[in-house]
Amino acid sequence: MTDVATLTSTDVEVGINRANEDMIWIGEHLRVETLFKRYARLREEFGLQAIRLAFSIGISESSLSRIFNKHNKPNRSTLIAIDVALNEWEKLFSIESEGVDE
C-alpha cells in the first residue's frame, strides 16, 4: 500500500497571501472536464472502471457519474480527492505497464 505522505494533487500553488504570509492553495484550478479526460484515458488505456475510482475516494459510482456528467457541482475537496486518486491510478498503471514487453 502507498504511504499517505506520497499522495499529491496536480494543482498546488505556493505564494504569498494578502497578509504577506506564505500560503499554499490546493485545488483552486481543478476542473471536472480535465479530471474526466484523465479518467477517460485511464479507462481506455487500462480499463479503469468508474466504480474502482469512486470506491478509492469513498463515494458511490452514481455520485462520480453525476459529477462527471455535471449533474452535481462537487466541493473542491471532492475534486482534490479525484485528482489524487487519478494520480495514484496513473502511478499504479505505469508501474504495471513497465513490466509488460512491448
Image (tube, helix red, strand yellow):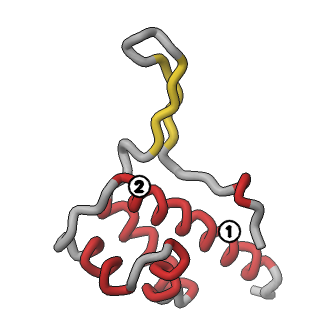
Q: Relative to 2, is 60 on the left or the right? A: left
Name the residue located 46 percent from the left edge and 65 percent from the top edge: 82
Where residue 74 sits, quadrant-wise, is bottom left
Name the residue located 65 percent from the left edge and 57 percent from the top edge: 7
Local packing at callout 2 (Cα closer than 10 Å; few below 14, some 14-19, many 20+) is few
Under tag 2, what secondary structure?
A: helix
Name the residue located 54 percent from the left edge and 52 percent from the top edge: 9
Under tag 1, what secondary structure?
A: helix
Q: Which amino acid does label 1 sit on?
A: Lys
Q: Relative to 8, is 42 on the left or the right? A: left
Instruction: Give residue 91's mark.
Output: 1
Look at the image and tell me in which quarter the C terminus lies.
Answer: bottom right
Whichever of callouts 1 and 2 sits on the residue coming sooner in the sequence is 2
Name the residue located 36 percent from the left edge and 61 percent from the top edge: 34
Q: Nearer the viewer, residue 20 or 10?
A: 20
In the orientation shown, which residue stands out farthest toward the front? Answer: 58
Where is mark 2, residue-wise?
A: 77
Nearest-to-viewer mark from 1 and 2: 2
Q: Which amino acid does label 2 sit on?
A: Ser
Q: Distance between the residues labelled 1 and 2?
A: 21 Å
